[in-house]
Image (cartoon, coloured by chain):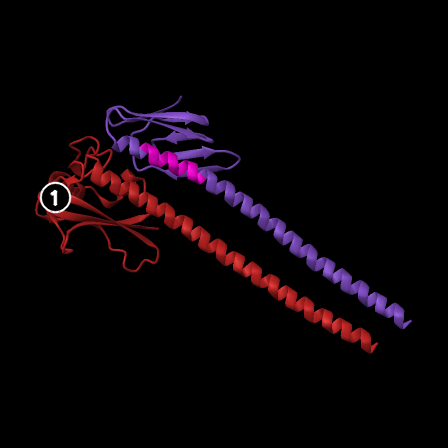
Amino acid sequence: MKKAQISIEWLFAIGTLFLVFLLVLGFSFDKKIEVMKTEKYIGLRGECLKLSEIIVSTFLSGNGTEIQTQISYNASIDPNNQLITIEDVDLVTCTIPINRTSNVDLEEGLVILSNVGDYVDLENG
Amino acid sequence: MGKGQIVSLDLILSIVVFILLIGGIIAFWNIYILRFNANIKQEELALKATKITDLFVESQGVPTGWNETNVQVIGLVDRDRRLSSNKLASLLNVTYAQIKTSLNIDANEFYFRVVDLNGALVKAKGNFVEVGNSSLDVEQVIEMRRFALYGNQKVVLEFSIWE
């Protein structure tokens, strides 16, 4: 009888531990997804900021400037709202301080930026 | 029975310690995430400030002889890093909201001024070059300083931006 009671205690103990480890597993899985999402977001954001920086550089470098760059995701430029949107599973946007750019959807790959009369024209190469 | 109770007490104690540890890790994680997000915001503000001050000291603006009624891009120089008194005066005629819209920083606040190397405000067409309200009581503010020439004088453009 005593032995049986100990077994039930052990059963309870193991069950509790199992529950605790399940909780930890759930927590770590949740955090892993969070880290992966953040990693993805950082990549998209980096691409957006890079494009924004290159657009401003092309503008500031003056008429006749041409810059080529590679982008790893599709992007769209909206000069009316002065926004760049990087498209992947998630959308990431960043701002540009000028509205003198073409309104264009770019595909990943080579992008050519040209300054024509203080207007930045973007197109896929 | 006595043995069983001792085992249970040990177990309960160890579980409590374990849960406390896990709680500590979760708390640390959340603090780290908060700091990380704050860093991202600060970095974005710093990049905005860099681009805006780049425009100010490297661009003539669009149109080249812009004023408060036709400004598309705000630039404050005649030549690279040589400030134009006409453009500084025009900037003072543009409203704070109009400047924010032009620079696409509607969600932010900013403070801009031009001072000489002693920290005294510089005048353009009789008015001190100062736009917006100082950010003294704001916690996270990005301040950017750029050197330029104004006439034959070395001056500093100070631009602060915050949320």
User: Does A29 sit left or right of B143 as displayed?
Assistant: right
Q: Where is residue B148 in the image (x, y as percent from the top left)?
A: 17, 44
What residue lies at 48% left-to-right and 41% top-to-bottom? A41
Residue at the top extreme, as displayed: A125
Q: Position of residue B133 (x, y in %)?
A: 24, 53
What residue lies at 53% left-to-right and 57% top-to-bottom? B29
| Residue at numbered disc 1 | B150
Above or below B118: residue B61: above
Whether residue A99 appears in this view of the structure is no
Q: Mark 1 lies on which chain?
A: B
Read off the magenta span: A45-55
Nearer to us in this view, B131 or B49? B49
Dot 1, how many residues are within 10 Å of its Cα: few (below 14), some (14-19), or many (20+)?
Answer: some
User: Does B54 sit left or right of A47 as displayed?
Assistant: left
Whether residue A37 appears in this view of the structure is yes
Residue at the right extreme, as displayed: A1
Q: Is residue A49 covered in magenta?
A: yes
Q: Is residue A80 covered in magenta?
A: no
Which chain did the image draw in purple? A
Nearer to us in this view, A36 or B114? A36
Above or below A18: residue B112: above
User: Does B77 sit left or right of B97 as displayed?
Assistant: left
Which chain did the image draw in red? B
Nearer to us in this view, B147 or A24? B147
Nearer to us in this view, B129 or B70? B129
User: Does B39 sit left or right of B31 as displayed?
Assistant: left
